Amino acid sequence: MLKFPLSTLLTLESSSKKTLRKTIVLGIFVFGLLGCSEDLYSPSQMWRMAQKEEPTLELVPIKDPSRRILCINFGPGCIKGTGKRVRIRRVELILVKFETVKQAQTEAYRRGQYYARNWVFDEMADEPVLIDFVTKVFGAKNAREELGEQ
């Protein structure tokens, strides 16, 4: 039988408790990060994905102030300065970033448009070219169809 001094046993027990505590705290932290975060697209991710599919994609410069994309025209969660006009296969598309997926879905539903994650694609009502593009590249969904309404 092995014999250890009492102080060694107390140190081992204390060390094991600290390690266990650290592991539990780390596990809760990691689980919290994974469980609470939404899978959102950044503007650079959106651009790379779009260019990969359509290399001739271009950002449309807005010279006329009336064509600007302003959050005042969109619902809650619209992120100021993210609205863009993009030309895809000679057709223009408006993209607007939102803070959350739910806010993007709500705004897309209100407008009868498509959304993907935290982005709304606007002014594409019956444009097959745009619908094909956003569904193929971003996995976009029509919010009204998704929720069972037309």
Image: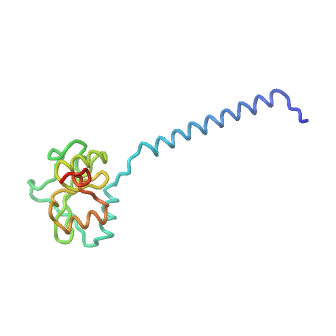
Instruction: Give x and y (percent) for residue 123.
Output: 15, 58
Percent position of residue 139, x then y: 31, 61
Quarter of the figure with residue 17: top right
Percent across and percent down for residue 13 are 73, 31
Furthest residue in direction front, as rendered: 148
Query: Residue at the spot x=42%, y=42% of the render?
Result: 36
**Left or right: 33 with respect to 115?**
right
- Horizontal relation, residue 5 to residue 48: left or right: right
How many discs mark residues in the rendered view? Answer: 0
Residue 105 falls left or right of residue 69:
right
Reply above or below: 104 against 2: below
Does residue 38 lie above or below 15 as drawn?
Answer: below
Residue at screen point 27% across, 57% down: 141
Q: Quadrant of the N terminus?
A: top right
> Observer-nearest residue: 39 or 42?
39
Which quadrant does the C terminus fall into? bottom left
The one of 136 and 55 positioned closer to us in this rendering: 136
Looking at the image, which residue sits at the far top? 6
Residue at the extreme right:
1
Q: Position of residue 2 (x, y in %)?
A: 89, 36
Q: How is the image coloured?
A: rainbow
For image coordinates 25% across by 43% down, the residue present is: 77
